[in-house]
Structures are given as C-alpha cells and as structure tokens.
Image (spheres, helix red, strand yellow):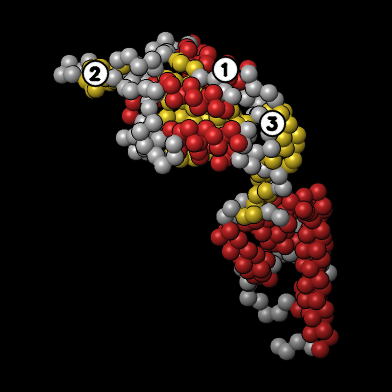
Amino acid sequence: MIPSQPETQQSQHRALWRLSRIVLTLFVVLLVVAAVTLIPYGAQLRNAQYMRPWALGGLVLVPILLWRCTYGEDRRTVRVRVGTISAMVMGPRGWRVAYRDVPGAIRSIAFGLLVLALARPVDTTRPETTEESGIDVMLVLDLSGSMSAVMENVPDDLKPHVTLPEPGIPPRRVDIAKAVVRDFISRRKSDRIGVIVFGKSAFVLSPQTLDYQLLDQLVARMELKIIDESGTAIGDALGAAVARLRHSSAKSKTVILLTDGENNSGAIAPIYAAELAAKVGAKVYPIQIGDGSEALVYAGRDLLGQPHFDKQNFPINPELLKELAKKTGGTMYVASDAKALQASFHDVLDKLEKSRFEAGIARFEELFPILLLPGVLLLAIEALLRAFFLRRFP
C-alpha cells in the first residue's frame, strides 16, 4: 500500500519534531552541566592537564551512543506483522512517547563526562608566592664506606626514624645520620632545605625545597653503595652546596656537613670550597661523626647465625673541619654517639638568624570529581526516566 501525500508530510513533520526534541534535550542538559561545572570551575578545566590522554579517544563513541539510544532503538522494537497500521499511525500519541529519546540523549552526555573524568584532568595552578620566615640550609651527608661503622646511644625520640639493614643489628653511622636528618626535617616549618650526598663524588639529592614529605622519602631511601664509597670528596660536596646557595636571597645561608672521614678524593680542595662559601655568605657547620678510635663494623653472621663485627680504624681530620668552620664563621662539632650527633645538629639551628624569603608552592588539584559526579547523576536520572516516565511504545 503506497502512503498518501498527507501521510508522507505528517510522517516528515513528526520526524522533524523528533529531531528537534533530541537537539533541545542535548542543549538543555549541556547547559545545566555547563552551569554546574564550567561556571565555578571553568578556568581550572581549561588549563587542566590530562594524566590519561589516551582515554579521550572514547569521546568518538559519544555520537555513536547517541544514535544507538535514540534512532537505533527503533530497530530493536518488537514488530508484529499486520495488514495495515495506518489507524495506529494516525492516532494520537502521549507525551511519554513523544519524549522517548530524552533518556538516550542524557546517557550520551553522561558517557562523555565519564570519559573526561577517566582521562583524569589535573589542575596545576600558578605557584602561590608567600612570605615565610626561615633559613636556607644545605645538608651535606657523607656516604663513604666508613659510615658503615656501628653507632650507639640512640635517643628514644630518634628511634622511630632509624631503619636497620637487618633485624637485630646495631644501627650504623649512616642510619643514625639519616635518622637525625629526618628528625630535623620533621621539625621544620619554613626553612628551605636541600640535601647533597657524597662519597668519591658529590651528588645533589634535592635542591632547597619546602616539600618536607618528599625530602623525608628521599633521605629514607639513601643507602651505602648507591654511590662510589671508595673515597671522601668533602671539597666537591661543599662546593656543590655553595653552588646551590649562590643565588639564595636569605640572610642566613647554612651548610651542615656530616662526615666521619678525611678528604681524600675530588677535584676541589675543601679550603677553597670554604672560601667560596664565605664569599656567598654561607656558614659551614661541620659535624665530625666519631672520635677516631676503633669502630665496630658489621661483617656478617657466623655459622650459628650470630652477628660478627670487625674492628677498624677510620682516619679523621678534625683540624680540617675546624678550619672550614673558622673561615666561614661556623662552629665545628664532634659527635661520638647518636645522642651527641642529635644535640650538635639542633645546636646549629639555635645559632641561626631567621631571614625573610619568598617561597613558591605549586598546587596540584584533581579535577575528575567535577566531571564524575554530574555524569553519575545523569545516569541515575536516565534510569529513572526509563523506568517510571517514558516509554517507546504508544
């Protein structure tokens, strides 16, 4: 049966209205989503960096899903072969059928929001500049082989920061030095701290920063043998610290040098490095770990599983450390045990003058909840509309 011209025109009219309702639904829903997300968070979303950019490829599925949930639903409708349905076609239709494509349009927008949330947008705002009262400190830690000697008399408040290489083994000098540094970092609030480690060569573990959590993690992971421990390059380490402090605007610039050996490696003489420190206004506070007497070094376990220790002598040069402190206006300390090392470390801070400097803090904010929540709410609305309000058969 060939449909008449009025029937054809009416069918086209209904198809046009259907398309307009889909477009109107998309416009209204997008307008609401924009009001909820773009108005309060527009600047952050525009400047966002996507941590999973590959997930954005899922956006190409949005138009496919839109068609599948609207016009594509018609092809899934169960059909019954009858002679003619012209009477039903020409009959009146309820509003629940007229707006049957609304859930599909809502689902497609919800899917797009979930894809954007999956891409994990992150907002890196401009560093906030604030004035803080503090000092610039470079911690210079010796990681040469002599730091493997046993160190005793650990204070109770320092024990939580001590990590042992093996259970039942006394802490080594390097373990106590790390614990003292971590304890010091945990007590700071507005001091910019950097860390340099050295053995035969010197390395910058971290430049000056206010990120104490990161510093604590870096120091906790330090271990002997991660660098060449066959030498002690005090001059190179001190020179590297001075280079980091050269452009500092703080009035108090300090280098705390923890070492238990004598300079026997490197390209820079320690005295020359101290002269450079004096030129940039940095004070050097050497802390000598050990007093030069015989020290115990863990040498493994015997056949019965008991720890075995060897006695070794490690050369020290207190005259050199005193000269480094004298040339820069600092003070030299001798720490024969863990308690003395901690006391020396904190005594340095009591002598330092506070200065004013600008501290830059970069903030990282996760933005995916801004997109995830509207997407989930739209899916819930779509499910309610399909279940209780709208249907596809008149």
- Rendered residue at 58%/58% (across/down): 53
**Residue 54: in sight, yes or no?**
yes
Q: CA distance from mark 2 to mark 3?
A: 46 Å
Q: Quadrant of residue 300?
A: top left
**Dots 2 and 1: beta carbons under 8 Å?**
no
Q: Residues within 10 Å of mark 2 (few under 14, many from 20)?
A: few
Q: Position of residue 199 (x, y in %)?
A: 38, 35
- Residue assigned mark 3: 251
In front here: 60 or 41? 41
Mark nearer the N terminus (2 vs 1): 2
Mark nearer the N terminus (1 vs 3): 3
Q: Is residue 332 above or below residue 359?
A: above
Amino acid type for the residue under numbered disc 2: Asp
- Residue assigned mark 1: 346
- Rendered residue at 79%/79% (across/down): 11
Q: Position of residue 169 (x, y in %)?
A: 32, 18
Amino acid type for the residue under numbered disc 3: Lys
Give the position of the C terminus as an image quadrant.
Answer: bottom right
**Residue 209: in sight, yes or no?**
no
- Rendered residue at 65%/49% (across/down): 122
- Residue assigned mark 2: 310
